[in-house]
Amino acid sequence: MKLKIDHNSPVPLHAQVEELLRKMIQLPEYRNGGFLPKEVELAKKLSISRNTLRQATNKLEYEGLLIRKKGVGTKVAENSVTTRLDSWHSFTQEMNEQGVAFQTFNVEISWTKANEKIASFMNVDEGTELLCLARLRGTKDGPFVYFESYFHPRIGLTGEEDFTQPLYDLLENDFSTVADVSKERIKARAATKITADRLKIKTGEPVLLRERFVLDAGNRPIEYNIGFYRADKFTYSIDIQR
């Protein structure tokens, strides 16, 4: 691929560079973890300033397409999944919207006693038995997220349901339970051995922990969900408009 932009074009240089980079990161030598040419070298080849180049790389870094490591260079991010704060759905709906061909590696259904935290959210006694749905999911390249969902006993789930369909469609269509609000907490943590084994990573590698507290229109709890995502395979995007 020829590295060239048009300095006589009315299109701003940084926009041209951004478009060029988007084409570059699809090339076999860069896709999924390859390092781009050094910043100084690339700016010189394009006859632009490093600031102009950074305008373009900053945009792609924000989108999760590039990863910049100080003293190392800028590399193309491996294929990842992005979810947005302003549009939450079930995992199935999120993946379908993005055209991601996902698969479920393992499903476990059990009855478990609510701990203090979950009981407090559900407004039930600690020790109340709740249905727990655990799923290990990902793509053909391997798992990238492990979920555990706990449901309020008011819903009436038995554990015999078809959980291959979108979760919130199931709750609405079969149990007249409509998810209306999702309150989320997100933090980073080091993978424990159990989580690392599930996600096929090393113990201590970073994972994204995402808690979801789902309520209906009457502000009644429906589901407590906790997910552990591979940090190199998942991006959480937040757009804030003033």
Image: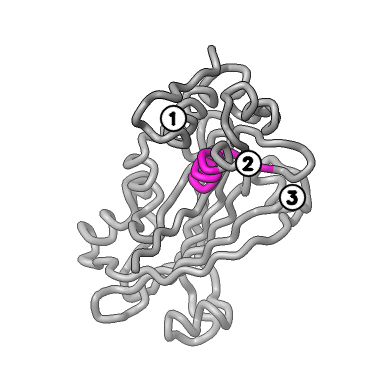
**Residue type of the residue flagged with mark 1:** Gln
- Which corner quadrant of the image does residue 73 belong to? top right
| Label disc, if present, on residue 72 of the rendered structure | none
Q: To which residue does mark 1 refer?
A: 16
First in sequence: mark 2 vs mark 3: 2
Label 2, secondary structure: give it: strand
Q: How crowded is mark 1: few (under 14 residues within 10 Å), some or many (20 or more)?
A: some
**Residue type of the residue flagged with mark 3:** Glu
Camera-nearest label, 2 or 3: 2
Going 62% across and 21% down the picture, which residue do you hit? Answer: 45
Mark 1 → mark 2, Cα distance in angstroms:
20 Å
| Label disc, if present, on residue 67 of the rendered structure | 2
- Which corner quadrant of the image does residue 85 belong to? bottom left
Q: Position of residue 150 (x, y in %)?
A: 46, 67
Q: How crowded is mark 2: few (under 14 residues within 10 Å), some or many (20 or more)?
A: many
Residue 135 among magenta residues:
no
Q: How crowded is mark 3: few (under 14 residues within 10 Å), some or many (20 or more)?
A: some
Label 3, secondary structure: give it: loop
Q: Give the range drawn in magenta.
A: 55-68
Q: Position of residue 106 (x, y in %)?
A: 53, 43
Q: Where is residue 221 in the image (x, y as percent from the top left)?
A: 36, 77
Camera-nearest label, 1 or 3: 1
Q: Position of residue 35 (x, y in %)?
A: 68, 28
**Residue type of the residue flagged with mark 2:** Ile
Label 1, secondary structure: give it: helix
Q: Is residue 31 above or below residue 82?
A: above
Q: To which residue does mark 3 refer?
A: 205
Going 54% across and 69% down the picture, which residue do you hit? Answer: 112
